[in-house]
Image: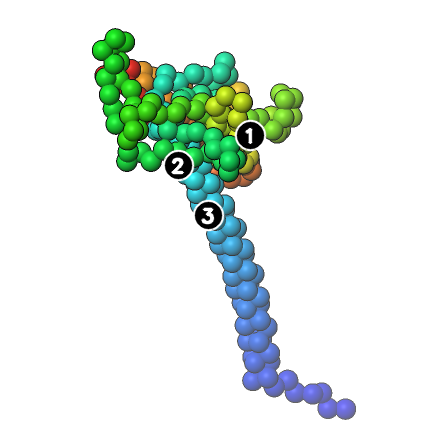
């Protein structure tokens, strides 16, 4: 029997195919790996953007309310809630809703007997006043529970026997710790003069980038220093 002659061109072509296939597989693996990394990066970026948006929404709602205060702020012992008085709000017993006297009709008068300013409406009647409490309420009372470090941001408006609570933001909290290793509060208030200092921390998942907002809020209607 005559041995089969190997075709050099056929062998070279087969080798080229094998090399090309190997290169293609390597490129495909690298491409898939890069795509996965970009996908994970994109998901993380979306999560970070969502955290920032939630933080600013919660902070904006709270800031608008606190700026309407006209009394010395009162803090709880933990610094997680602040109570102020807000002008012009009253509870309409007919509609069972809170309403506000149009601020455009407010006038500021001076009481010479008490040496203090006060506000009246267009009919010279003293403006109604309501108590407003902004509070970060922990989701658990157990310090060992994870939910203890997260809470809902609420606003409670009350006057006399009438009281209504609204939720401004849910699950505000963080996995961040301070220099002593203690978990930071999701929300903390302090008072500086007639201003309210607020610090918000948000990091719902340990893999998320932590986000914080700090601000000093000046009460628009504060009159004690005038």
Which picture quadrant has residue 188? Answer: top left
Q: Which of the two discs, 1 and 3, sits closer to the camera?
A: 1
Q: Residue furthest right?
A: 1
**Badge 2 local density, few (<14 within 10 Å), some, or many (20+)?**
few
Residue count near mark 1 (Cα–Cα under 10 Å), binned few <14, some 14–19, many ≥20: many
Q: Is residue 94 found left or right of 3 in the rendered image?
A: left
Up/down of 40 relative to 113, above or below: below
Q: Are marks 1 and 3 in contact (CB under 8 Å)?
A: no
- Residue drawn at x 56%, y 84% as measured from the top left: 9
Residue sitting at x 43%, y 43%: 53
- The secondary structure type at the circle numbered 2 is helix
Residue 186 shows in the view? no
**Which numbered disc, 2 or 3, marks the residue closer to the eye?**
2
Could you tell which of marks 1 and 3 lies nearer the N-terminus?
Answer: 3
Q: Which quadrant is the C terminus positioned in?
A: top left
Q: Nearer the viewer, residue 86 or 143?
A: 86
> Which image quarter: residue 121?
top left
Q: Residue 122: image x %, image y %?
A: 28, 31
The numbered mark, 2 or 3, whose residue comes first in the sequence reads 3
Residue 91 on image: x %, y %: 47, 30
Residue holding disc 1: 151
């Amino acid at each position: 029997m005559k041995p089969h002659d190997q075709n050099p061109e056929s062998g070279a072509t087969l080798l080229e195919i094998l090399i090309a296939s190997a290169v293609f597989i390597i490129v495909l693996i690298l491409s898939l790996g890069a795509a996965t990394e970009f996908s994970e990066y994109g998901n993380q970026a979306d999560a970070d953007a969502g955290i920032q948006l939630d933080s600013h929404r919660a902070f904006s709602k709270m800031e608008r309310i606190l700026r309407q205060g006209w009394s010395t702020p009162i803090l709880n012992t933990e610094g997680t809630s602040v109570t102020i008085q807000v002008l012009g709000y009253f509870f309409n017993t007919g509609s069972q809703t809170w309403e506000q006297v149009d601020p455009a009709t407010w006038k500021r008068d001076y009481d010479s007997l008490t040496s203090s300013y006060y506000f009246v409406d267009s009919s010279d009647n003293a403006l109604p006043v309501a108590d407003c409490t902004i509070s970060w309420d922990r989701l658990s009372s157990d310090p060992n529970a994870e939910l203890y470090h997260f809470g809902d941001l609420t606003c409670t408006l009350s006057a006399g026997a009438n009281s209504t609570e609204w939720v401004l933001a849910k699950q505000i909290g963080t996995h961040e710790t301070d220099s002593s290793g203690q978990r930071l509060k999701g929300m903390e208030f302090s008072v500086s003069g007639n201003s309210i200092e607020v610090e918000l921390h948000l990091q719902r998942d340990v893999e998320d980038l932590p986000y914080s907002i700090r601000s000093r809020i000046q009460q628009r209607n504060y009159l004690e220093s005038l």
